[in-house]
Amino acid sequence: MFDYIQNIRSHHTVPCTAEILHTVMQSTIVGQTCAEIADCHEKMLRGEMSREDFETKKSELKRRLPAFCFHAHFKNGRRLNNEAVPSGLSILDIDHIPSPEVFFNEKVKEKAKELGIVLAHKTPSGEGLRLVFVIPEGMGLVEGQQWLAQQMGLSEFDEACKDLARCSFAVPEEYVLFLDEEELFKAIEPIDTIEAIDTIDSIETIGAASNKSLKIFDLCREQAGLKDVDINARGSRHNSLLAILSVGAARLLSEAEAMAVVAQRMPDFFKEPDCRQLIHDFYAKYHDDSKMMSATVQRINARAEQLAKQQQSKNDKAQEDESEEETTEAATTQSTNVYPDIPPIPGLKQSLTGVPEQMRMPALCALLPMAASYADDVTFRYCDGREQRLGLMSIVVGEQASGKSVCKDIIDLWRGPMDEDDEQGRRKEDEWKKKRKNRRANEKLDPEPEVLIRDVPITISCSTLLKRLKNAQGHTLYSFCSELDTLRKTNGAGSWSSKYDIYRLAFDHDEWGQDYNSDQAESGMVSVGYNWTILGTYGALGKCFKGENIENGLSSRVIVAEMPDSAFAPMPLFQDRKDRDAQAILEAVNTLRAKHGFIDTPRLRKAIARWVEDKRQQAMERIDRVMDTYRRRAAVIGMRSGVVACLLSGEKETKHVIDFALMMAEYVLQEQCRLFGDVLRKQYAADNDNTRKSKNRAVFDRLADTFTSHDILALKNDISDAAARMIIKRWREAGWIEPLPRQKGDKGHKFKKVKRNNVTA
């Protein structure tokens, strides 16, 4: 039995199965990373890259790869030599050989089984051969390696593979030259989880659960409403554990991790076989990693990660200075929640007073476009060097009766001063309309007054909206709508379908206009300064954001926030807002209205630039085009939110301001990917499917219905192995091909063409 780790920096291991082995070797990250290494190797051979630069780049890329710990299984899930159980396997690495394939065929292939070799593959560099073999009885790791080298007549081999915690980087299946799957997974029979734990005399020998795992359990306990309940009490502990597993613990923890955590959090219950059987059965029946994480589970995971890092940082500091132990303990026992920590920003903080914690984030997202509307004469420089203004739009989505009205209550407080300013203009406009209606024949009427009205209904017609923008005097208009479905159903003038182009232009204060040959309709060109907040249900969101409004970029320009799941949840309790909070909100409005001109935010700009680059790297590692698309405007929204926070903080780029901007960028990215990601992925797939004039289409058409990468190389002999793998990857993403199960004796992985409507793609 041997283990698998996610990457070389990870110390958490899981037992490897045949399914895990093949899944890892077929994964995108392994194929893409090894393809990049192969490209660098070819550049080195062509003289375009030095050996030193190649070694540096190779080392950097290999850190992305998952790895197998062939030497051992780690009983506590931690890759430490003192916790290793030898697997009976060893590794022999033969480096820097001209052709690993030729070496294997000439010196290894015929006697592979005789020598106990169970796996042979090219190394990620393409310059080495790795042999995994069963250690002869009575030998250790090093003795076994020396014996195998002697059998093959080798005088030199990599002697660094001599500790049990040594890792072996994963490679694509195309790199595999020999595999005896039955023997590979028979070296030491896997132990049954339940039976293994039953044989343990002491609970401590299970090993301490990781810091993050404990945080996940505690947050799930709180999410299940069990924070103040004794989950160890007889009669209720069975249901308590089920509730904790159901709300997210089983989604975020492996079965082994759950066992370790329950052993610490529910020690008496864990001693009983019924507890361990309950966990085992729950994972067997309900655990499915392929399902998308809910927003609640994502928040629990993010919060647990944050708390674990904070505690680790505190613990590290405490080890350096023992006098700080009490402070550290106080910090690590503070109350936790599963929602993002909202940094205290003047005005925004008081706006959330009395709002239940789980509703604060959607309430904040609803408020930001309103706040940004007041600072409509402010410009700032974004990371790309261009000046921008504070265009923001948000949609708060939730089920019926989920408490979305809390957003309206807050916005009503903020838009009071705007409505007071509008009142005089509306009165003038109403008086003029009354005069027009009551005028006598041939009576001359004064021209219609050009009044400033900023708070407009979301169902405003395009013509009236154009008129309001022409009279806006450079100000930003604002709309609030309590029902997204109301907007969707207004199929006449001002409908969603007529205005989505305007909304997209509003994000960047771009120009829009219309030109009619009629005095009855408004004509002209304007700069679109228009922010809005809309509340709605998931159904209405799905109807408004179909393929078109996802693909054209509207979805990436909108802050989308979710109300907490209200199914079977107790009634949320609100608290009254105090007079001083209302006064702080009014002061915040006045602060924003008083700001004019350019504001320079170099620290904020640097932080957002670093965040968007980190997300680019993550998206590239995962080959996640959706994340790569949404990260860009999520960064813009985070920056604009940070500028609002900076203005409210006296134009000081404090740590709270930076944290606020990064929190908003992260939240927006997660929600956009979660709510719109599937539709965008399908759109990308459809686009790829419709691209029939690909430069490799002729090669595709000439291939048989089933083929391997070698067949592609035979038809297109001017490309490398890595390029062939990249072509296959693109065809798979486009849905043109799908992999076939690997059969014994197959040379290379086989694929088959996908047929649609009886026509091959």
Image: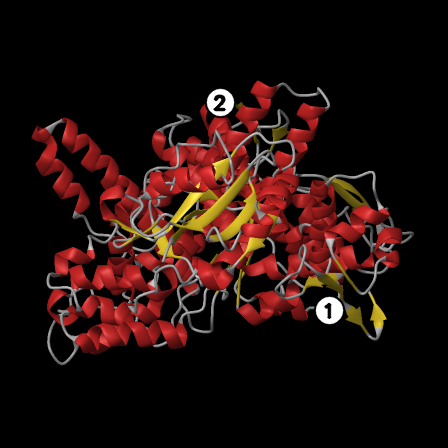
Q: Position of residue 554 (x, y in %)?
A: 66, 52
Answer above or below: position of 632 versus 540.
above
Pointer 2 local density, CA inside 10 Å: few below 14, some 14–19, many at least 20 = few
**Disc sitting over residue 258 in the figure:** none
Residue contact between numbered discs 1 and 2, judged by CB atoms under 8 Å: no
Name the N-terminal-most of marks 1 and 2.
1
Q: Secondary structure at mark 1?
A: loop
Horizontal side of 647 relative to 54 (left or right) equals left
Q: Which residue is mark 1?
A: 491
Dot 1 amino acid type: Asn
| Colour treatment of the image | secondary structure
Q: Position of residue 415 (x, y in %)?
A: 47, 49
Dot 2 amino acid type: Pro
Q: Secondary structure at mark 2?
A: helix
Q: Which residue is mark 2?
A: 602
Nearest to the eye among marks 1 and 2: give it: 2
Answer above or below: position of 485 versus 391.
below
Which quarter shows the N terminus? bottom left
Q: Residue furthest bottom?
A: 235
Question: What's the residue at 45%, 58% (across, down)?
Answer: 184
